[in-house]
Image (cartoon, rainbow, N blue to C red):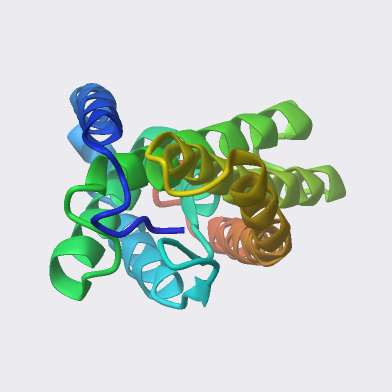
Amino acid sequence: MHIADGFLEAPVIITTAVVSAGLVTAVAKKTPPKELASPMVGASAAFVLAAQMVNFPVASSVSGHIIGGVLVAVLLGWRVSVLVLTSVIVIQSLVFQDGGVAALGANILNLGIVGPGLGYLLFRTVRGNAAHDWTLRSSVAAFLGGWTASVVAALMAAVQLWLSGQADLKTIVLLMFGVHALIGVAEGMATVLIARFLNHHHQKCSTYSQVPGGEFS
């Protein structure tokens, strides 16, 4: 649901840019360098970049796609997820013209911070204390987290377009929700399958190796 240039009014552009810049800066300052040193960070960024390049047209100003933010947060933590998604969104805008430069603040806020943030919060809440055991409850939590991230990000984009006078609020909200409720199913399933596979792979490797390393979060 990248928003292109020319669809957001100046107040929305400025507000979202300031909020996103402030939040990303705060997250970066609180993220220890060792959390970014894992090869999984680069692999996650590559996966998200590839996944988000597959777009489904929604309207003239936006497109729908898998976000991948909750998956990264499940694997590496929410702070790393914010930094990975921000990097991917900037690259998409500057290199592939997928999402506007002026709309970077809005796209980062929607796709990189709030949508995945709420999805990951729901994941943690539903999963409970079973942090290192991938159970049926963990799968349900991951699915709901991925679905929520997709829908929340889409609804935020809808409100921003409405505030910019691009669409009637009811019309754009219903359109975005309807499309992204379906895309969210794919998002949720991808989050479950990939996170579950990597969790099982991590546990299997741990059985045969005593080399200390970071925990699967």
Nearer to me, 160 or 104: 160
Q: Residue at x 57, y 44 (%)?
A: 168
Numbered marks: total? 0
Nearer to me, 59 or 178: 59
Query: Can residue 41 be seen?
Result: yes
The spot of residue 82 in percent (x, y) is: 35, 40
Q: Residue at x 33, y 41 (%)?
A: 106
Image-based side of 73 in relation to 133, left or right: left
- Image: 18 above or below 186: above
The spot of residue 214 in percent (x, y) is: 41, 42
- Image: 204 above or below 105: below
Q: Residue at x 67, y 42 (%)?
A: 170
The spot of residue 110 in percent (x, y) is: 43, 42
Q: Residue at x 49, y 58 (%)?
A: 67
Q: Quadrant of residue 195?
A: bottom right
Nearer to me, 55 or 87: 55
Image-based side of 49 in relation to 163, left or right: left
- Image: 182 above or below 165: below
Q: Quadrant of residue 101?
A: bottom left
The spot of residue 65 in percent (x, y) is: 51, 67
Q: Residue furthest right?
A: 136
Query: Can residue 214 be seen?
Result: no
Nearer to me, 58 or 126: 58
Image-based side of 64 in relation to 44, left or right: right
